[in-house]
Image: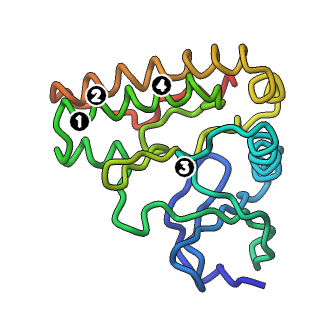
Amino acid sequence: MIYLQNHKPIGSGQTRDCYQHPHDSTKCIKIMKANQPSDVNAREWDYYQYLIKKHVDTSHLPQCYGFIDTDLGAGLVFDFIGENGGETFLSLLEKDKLSREKASKIFVGVEQYLKDTKICFIDTNLNNIVVDKDNFYIIDGIVPPKEKRAWLYQKVPLISRWRTQKSLKPAKRKLEKLLIGEPVENVGCGDTEIA
């Protein structure tokens, strides 16, 4: 049993809180928030198993290690990508730590990776991409919070690719605004509510 109640989440999304593993700083644990109608953790674990079975390149995703018992419920364990100083794409942009050229190159890399792998990326919030050294990782957003159409998005490559490209459009617009110095009030880029 892992005790997390006295720990502060390192991240919080629409459906889950994320905690650093108290006994292993290289790992993090995603916990479902109370009263969620859908178990995103279970669907994300299933999707990871599907990607592995299909021999999909997961080099830009954190490794997923399965479930662990915590005092907040079952948690899904992942590599903690920020452990070596990695920051979210949005944070780096807001702090002017990325040149326009490098930021554009990273985003093109994300687009190409998703096109090549057909990995479903629904919530394209720029906080769901972590840049660690010269590499990027998609740390969240590959599973819709709602079950509606999730199977199609995740298991039918053509539909997954179409949905991912649709989701990337607002993220690209936000990136372009940030790169020219325009303030962007809404952190979210994806449209998970209609997913």
Q: What residue is disc 2 on? A: 104
Q: Is residue 65 above or below residue 98?
A: below
Kind of residue indicated by mark 4: Gln
Helix, strand or loop at disc 3?
A: loop
Judging depth in this view, the residue of 122 and 131 nearest the camera is 131
Q: Residue furthest front?
A: 55
Whether 122 is drawn above or below 137: the answer is above
Q: What is the C-alpha distance between the residues marked 3 and 4?
A: 17 Å
Q: Which residue lies at the image location 63% right of the left edge and 13% below the top edge? A: 162
Q: Are marks 1 and 3 in contact (CB under 8 Å)?
A: no
**Eye-nearest disc, 4 or 2:** 4
CA separation, marks 1 and 2?
Answer: 5 Å
On the image, the x and y values in percent for residue 28 come to 59, 68
Sequence-wise, which precedes: disc 1 or disc 4? 1
> Would you name the residue on which mark 4 appears?
112
Report, in whole angstroms, how far the alpha carbon at label 4 lies from the one at label 2. 12 Å
- Amino acid beneath label 2: Ser
Q: Which of the two discs, 1 and 3, labels the residue nearer the N terminus?
A: 1
**CB under 8 Å between callouts 1 and 2?**
yes
Q: Residue 102 carries which label?
A: 1
Nearer mark to the viewer, of 3 and 4: 4
In front of the other: 173 or 36: 173
Going from the N terminus, do you reach mark 4 or mark 2 first?
2
CA separation in Å, label 1 and label 3: 20 Å
Residue type indicated by callout 3: Ile
Q: Mark 3 points at which residue?
A: 139
- The crowd level at tag 3 (other Cα within 10 Å; few <14, some 14-19, many 20+) is many
Label 2 neighbourhood size at 10 Å, few (<14), some (14-19), many (20+)? some
- Specify the amino acid type for callout 1: Lys
* Kind of element beneath mark 1: helix
